[in-house]
Image: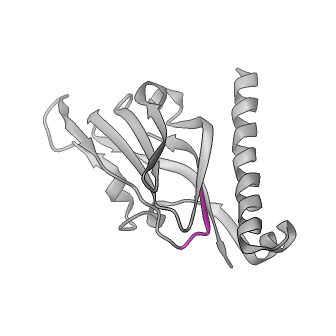
């Protein structure tokens, strides 16, 4: 288990370093200058779409008892204020295995598809992808989860960073 944690951790570090490298090349500046003129921070709900966490919490608390809902998909698209957006994992909340799949599109190309069996909350509410990815400001990044079942609250949110100018 320790080996898996170390391996996934090293993939997250690789993504972080790659984002800085891409930024410095795109801006035509050194890596040190990139780090002095830009900042990196964790992505939050307000970095996506309408800037409300409630956009990505699917609620079924008003229904009686356990049930299965019709398939639902919704797209998360980061706003354009970041030079680079990197995604290294997924937070699924307190709802067990509710996500059937996650599809990731950059522009019109599907670059990743993750089956929901790996995304359940038994993994401490979050999952670190084996193959993290990033997109630049000029690309259209869409993260599309698909769900058919839920508990009272199903949180669906990517884990990642954004790099922007100071």
How many labels sit on residues? Answer: 0
- 92, above or below 165, in the image: above
Q: Is residue 39 left or right of residue 75?
A: right
Q: Position of residue 15 (x, y in %)?
A: 70, 48
Q: Residue at x 44, y 39 (%)?
A: 92
Instruction: Pick out the residue farthest to the left.
Output: 64
Where is residue 14, by image quadrant? top right
- 72, above or below 163, in the image: above
Q: Position of residue 49 (x, y in %)?
A: 38, 65
Q: Is residue 104 left or right of residue 30?
A: left
Magenta span includes 2? no
- 32, above or below 148, in the image: below
Q: Position of residue 164 (x, y in %)?
A: 64, 72
- 24, above or below 57, in the image: below
Where is residue 20, by image quadrant? bottom right
Q: Residue at x 53, y 29 (%)?
A: 123
Q: Residue at x 54, y 73 (%)?
A: 81
The residue range painted magenta reads 81-85
């Amino acid at each position: 288990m320790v080996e898996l944690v170390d391996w996934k951790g090293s993939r997250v570090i690789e993504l972080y370093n790659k984002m800085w490298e891409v930024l410095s090349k795109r801006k035509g500046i050194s890596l040190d200058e990139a780090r002095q003129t830009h900042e990196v921070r964790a992505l939050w709900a307000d970095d996506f779409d309408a800037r409300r966490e409630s956009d990505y919490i699917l609620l079924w608390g008003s229904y009686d008892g356990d049930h299965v809902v019709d398939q639902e998909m919704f797209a998360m698209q980061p706003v354009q204020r970041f030079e680079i957006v990197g995604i290294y994992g997924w937070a699924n909340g307190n709802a067990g295995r509710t996500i059937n799949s996650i599809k990731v599109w950059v522009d019109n190309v599907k670059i990743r598809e993750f089956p929901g069996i790996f995304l359940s909350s038994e993994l401490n509410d979050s999952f670190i992808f084996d193959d993290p990815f990033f997109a630049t400001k000029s690309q259209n990044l869409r993260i599309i989860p698909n769900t058919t079942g839920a508990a009272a609250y199903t949180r669906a949110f990517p884990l990642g960073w954004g790099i922007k100018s100071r």
